[in-house]
Amino acid sequence: MERTLERTFDLGKGCDDQVPQRVAFYIGLLEPVFEEPSPHRLVGRERDEAFDFMLERDTSPVELITRRYASIVIFKPYNTCPQICVYCQRNWEIDDVLEHRALADVEKIKRAIEWIGEHPAIKEVLITGGDPLVLSDDGLDKLLQQIAGIEHIQRIRIGSRTPVTLPMRITDDLAGLLAGFRVPGKREVALVTHVEHPYEVTPDLVEVIEKLKSRGISAYNQMVFTFENSRRFEASLLRKMVKLAGIDPYYTFNMKGKEETQRFRVPMARLLQEQKEEARLLSGLDRTDEAVYNVPRLGKNYLRASQHRDLISILPDGSRLYEFHPWEKKMMLQQIFVIPDVPILPYLERLEERGEDPRSYESIWYYY
Ligand code: SF4
């Protein structure tokens, strides 16, 4: 722990004189925040039904594939990660940590890749899971060769948190292997990673990203906005630090879904407030990401596009009830999606328990 923090300080020196002070401030806030996982996360329900809150099966034309947008598919050949996140929207199908049988059956992989090949509208494949970079170099090479062999694929995206959880996995060989599938002007290889907090921007992560970017692989970050990183300035510092490490901030996801994540969830108003107020502290190049609500069955809804949702009611506990509109609503019959948000007052009270001053958040009531 000590070593990691020291190294974070060292990185801070290179960023900005204020960063070490900010990091020291965060360390002070760390103490009593960890909670015991509750047993109901583990037992008593059918995992598939309880956890597939994004209704991925409804948008899966063939096993291992999810298609929510015309030109992009998610391909999930490998269902495990070095770390299983409680808020993961895919852990309804993810196996145990580093489970050795997590690679899908060869026939299923073959069928999924054939299906991509039969659909020329698909230009981009996001390989995720699970974390595909846990696969061996050989296994990954075989998989990528098959995808790169499809003429109409212009971008291969690797969804991986390995640069954070297992940075030593990104060897020179692996970086070279991934870069070998780039064809400038024809096919891009991009890493979409998941850095959650400024603490995770370590020298190891910086080194890994440099290794990939120097070989022409672009890198983007998707942050899940949780109670833990929703406190003032944490997300803005994270954007600044990942950008200095060579990663472009790409999406900030507002949380939803299973009951297991309730303690992590944050009112949508806080994300909107954060992006409005704290964005002023950052250069435009640092604040490139979009705040999104990933609507089950429908895909991403940009929270700054207020015309894409309506606030339709306020419930007795103070939760705001939103109606999300599918973008095709005016062209065909589509179901809307109605969901209550996290009530604001208990959120502010929890922040106060952590030593935050709720008055510094008071404009939150004006965001919806
Ligand atoms: S690293 Fe990503 S895919 Fe793996 S459990 Fe976490 S959120 Fe899910």
Image (cartoon, grey):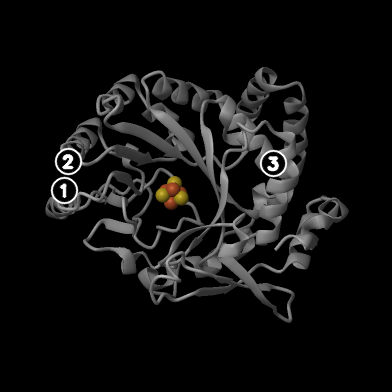
Disc 1 to disc 3, how far (Cα)? 42 Å
Q: Which mark is residue 117?
A: 1
Residue at 65%, 47% (x, y): give it. Answer: 229
Which residue position holds label 2? 150
User: For the residue marked with disc 2, what is the amino acid?
Assistant: Ile
Between residue 163 and residue 330, name the one nearer to us.
330
Q: Is residue 193 left or right of residue 284?
A: left
Q: Would you say residue 178 is visible in this rendering?
A: yes
Q: Would you say residue 231 is visible in this rendering?
A: no
Q: Earlier in the sequence, mark 2 or mark 3?
A: 2
Q: How many marks?
A: 3
Specify the quadrant that holds the N terminus: top right
Q: Position of residue 262 (x, y in %)?
A: 60, 65
Which residue position holds label 3? 234
User: 10 Å neighbourhood of mark 2: few (<14), some, or many (≥20)?
Assistant: some
Disc 2 to disc 3, how far (Cα)? 41 Å
User: For the residue marked with disc 3, what is the amino acid?
Assistant: Glu
Rendered image quadrant of residue 242: top right
Q: Please report contact status of discs 2 and 3: CB closer than 8 Å, yes or no.
A: no
Q: Earlier in the sequence, mark 1 or mark 3?
A: 1
Between residue 283 and residue 192, name the one nearer to us.
283
Q: Secondary structure at mark 3?
A: helix
Residue at 64%, 31% (x, y): give it. Answer: 240
Q: Residue furthest front?
A: 331
Q: Secondary structure at mark 1?
A: helix
Q: Secondary structure at mark 2?
A: loop
Residue at 82%, 50% (x, y): give it. Answer: 356
Q: Please report contact status of discs 2 and 1: CB closer than 8 Å, yes or no.
A: yes
Q: Residue furthest bottom?
A: 316
Q: Is residue 261 left or right of residue 30?
A: left
Q: Position of residue 344 (x, y in %)?
A: 74, 65
